[in-house]
Amino acid sequence: MQEKRSLMIVYKTEEEIELLKASNELVSKTLGEVAKRIRPGVTTKELDKIAEEYIQDHGAKPGFKGYQGFPNVLCTSVNNQVVHGIPNDQPLKEGDIVSIDCGVLLNEYYGDSAYTFKIGTVSEAIDKLLEITKASLYMGIEQAIEGNRVGDIGYAIQNYCEAQGFSVVREMVGHGLGKSLHESPEIPNYGKRGRGSKLKRGLVICIEPMINLGRKDIVQEKDGWTIRTFDKKPSAHYELAVAVNKGKAETLSTFKYIEEALKN
Ligand code: MG
Ligand code: MG
């Protein structure tokens, strides 16, 4: 989700990074719970309910519900939907993909993470789209180190994904994370090496590549939220939060709970 944000960058103390780690750990575990229930026939509304209960049971609040008027706990974006899809009663079916984006608010700090799930077996082209998009996220994270610039992150993601024939959504970007869900700076998934704001220790950012199988163009649906690809081809989305550090970024969220659940 995007909105106008303050241009001021808020650098976090060690204590604040610990709090952000707790929020992002909870969001990671929430997505792990969702992963346990993902299968053909389940509806995105059912997944939304699972996430809401899990977040509340752990003393936190959903981060998206009510945010700018968003109606649900999860953003569930199926197939050609890029981001900000609204959960509904339509069962997911074999061959679908669904990006599930979750936010939590715990001890005044936000967690924010997203993962694109396969429903059963997907086509080879879609499988590759997911694999490359996820790998590009980790390439972006590798660049999130002190002394680099925002453009180094975007360049790494764009260069890798475009080399595989995929395209990078321009209008939707990653962001700073803290007491607000979306802080400065914006973290585009495209860019030039050595350009943009300098990355400094204490900066906490969400990196979230949104990568399309076809053209990069997107449109918004009439519901005022859902973003889909213009050409109606599939799109993938993965998101993790990291704290910028010397030499190696510290990851605050993780896909390990999801990936453990998917193995079973
Ligand atoms: Mg998100
Ligand atoms: Mg985000």
Image (cartoon, helix red, strand yellow):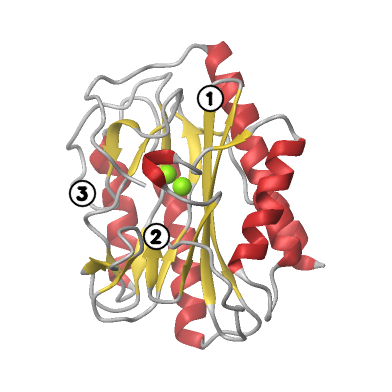
Residue 52, position as x, y percentages in the image: 66, 47
Residue 131, position as x, y percentages in the image: 51, 69
Mark seen at residue 153: none
| Residue that mark 1 sits on | 109
Q: Is 243 left or right of 54, judged from the image as shown?
A: left
Instruction: Tell me, yes or no, if residue 258 can be seen here.
Output: no
Across the whole image, how many numbered discs are drawn on residues?
3
Q: Which of marks 3 and 2 is in front?
A: 2
Name the amino acid, label 1.
Tyr
| Nearer the observer, 231 or 247 | 231
Give the spatial CA distance, label 3 vs label 2: 21 Å
| Residue that mark 2 sits on | 83
- Secondary structure of the residue carrying tag 2 is strand
- Secondary structure of the residue carrying tag 3 is loop
Q: Residue at x 53, y 16 (%)?
A: 16
Look at the numbered disc 2 and say if its residue's Cβ is closer than 8 Å to ligand 1. Answer: yes
Residue 56, position as x, y percentages in the image: 70, 37
Q: Which residue is drawn at 20% across and 49% down?
A: 191
Choose top left, top right, bottom left or bottom right for residue 169.
Answer: bottom left
Name the amino acid, label 3.
Gly
Disc 1 residue crowd, few under 14, some 14–19, many 20+, Cα 10 Å: many
| Residue that mark 3 sits on | 191
